Amino acid sequence: MSGLRVREREMLELGMSLPALASRATAIASLPPLGLLTLAALTPEGWETTLHECEGGVGALAHRLALDRPDLVAISALTPSINDAYVLADALRAEGIRVVIGGLHATAMPHEVAEHADAAVIGDGEPVWPDLLGDAAADRLRPLYQAPRPFDLCSAPVPRFDLVDGRPRPRYTIQTARGCPLACDFCGASRLLGPFREKPVELIEQELSALTGAHGARTIELADDHTFVGRRDPLPLLAAFERAGVRWFTEADWRIGERPALLDRLAASGCVQVLIGVETLVPRHAGMGAKAAPLSRVMDAVAAIQDRGVAVIGCFVVGGDGEDFESLHALGEFLVEAPFADLQLTLETPFPGTGLRVRLGREGRLLRDRGWEACTLFDVAFRPDRMSVEQLESGFRNLVRMVFAHGPSGRRAKLRRRIWGRREEVL
Ligand code: SF4
């Protein structure tokens, strides 16, 4: 169960009317589900595994599965889609089909999830999956499974990409690292995914070869939370991508713009774009660590990356404490002119398991009546400190309209062409 979701009608209509947002939503929805494909690769002989994506709605999927009558259904869902996962799980269990649910939401809210599943998996699924299947075979599933230690990415299998149906995918996904050593208070990656770990380059190369061989993949989106933040030398990783001959993009932070050796090989490795969390014009979020720096230094780093033929998507989180109408307007004015090749704007969202949710809960500012469906990144799910909820909603919509209007979007498209045109010179 993947893809972007939006609860508020006006925001949904606006998003669908803006080509940049609509195409990103389509791309995300068509990414193969890496977590499930990885578990499939760890499934012992004797089990037959199939992959079902939630197309055509939960009811249709429940109906198809009820006809197939599998021994066990594993569901992966994030917070905005968790209620759909519960509807599916409840329907399957009513048919006598056992269900296990894992992922970030299950990790943060295992007891809630366990009410809708025969088993909930807390944290990494890989270490517990063979035991869980053994318990399912012996009909003794436990409500909660949690590995005693984080999964070692040195043991990561090549995901079962062969289970993905034959419809064309604009891009495939692989993971080179899991978690993040920073601790931005709005982000679950640093807390829920366990310690930051990197996958050995030889294993990454095997995955790339599986994707480019049988599947003909040419574009890869890394499922990393924060690439290049670890201590390892990035050059062998970049060389592996270069040998695979793919175009790829990922999420990193602006400090890669201050690493000339990395920048020298980034475009040559096939990297076309990096998403960089600038987050705010003035630091509003706790835990950003070294990412929180003067804007001029961040923008110099962005310019250095783009000078090397790699486009930067500037990512901003809107609505944190201290934000008001004036600061929203100032952000809009900055972004309309800012030299980012593209932009991503999301609302600050109190996802379960984050420091932000704990703090807002303590302060009585969570809009609990809006439910998990409001945790979409595009809906307001808490009471801001300097505006009403309605003011933040309309202020965010205005900001999105302003930044993604025809003029600024066209200017960024031209900038992207210029940046990518530079690649020949820098290679
Ligand atoms: S740097 Fe990125 S991945 Fe790391 S905690 Fe912050 S937002 Fe999350």
Image (cartoon, rainbow, N blue to C red):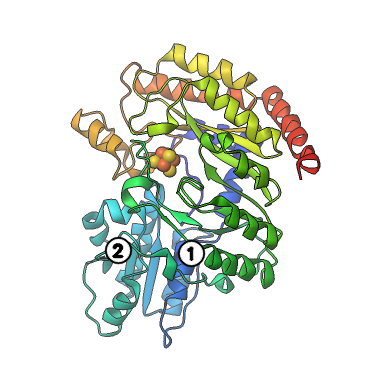
Q: Which callout, 2 or 1, points at the residue further toward the start of the chain?
A: 1
- What amino acid is at disc 2? Val
Query: Is residue 348 in sight in this rendering?
Result: no
Please indicate whether residue 169 sits to the left or right of residue 39 in the image: right
Q: Residue 60 carries which label?
A: 1
Mark 1, secondary structure of its residue: helix
* Horizontal and vertical percent position of residue 194: 32, 54
User: As displayed, is residue 133 above or below residue 396?
Assistant: below
In this rendered view, identify the residue nearer to me: 380 or 164. Answer: 164
Residue hosting label 2: 121
* 54 and 145: which is toward the camera: 145
Task: Assign a secondary structure to mark 2.
Answer: strand
Q: Position of residue 219 (x, y in %)?
A: 67, 55
Most extreme residue toward the top, as rendered? 326
In the picture as drawn, the residue positioned furthest to the bottom comes out as 46
Q: On the image, which quarter does residue 309 sit in?
A: top right
Depth-wise, is mark 2 or mark 1 nearer the camera? 2
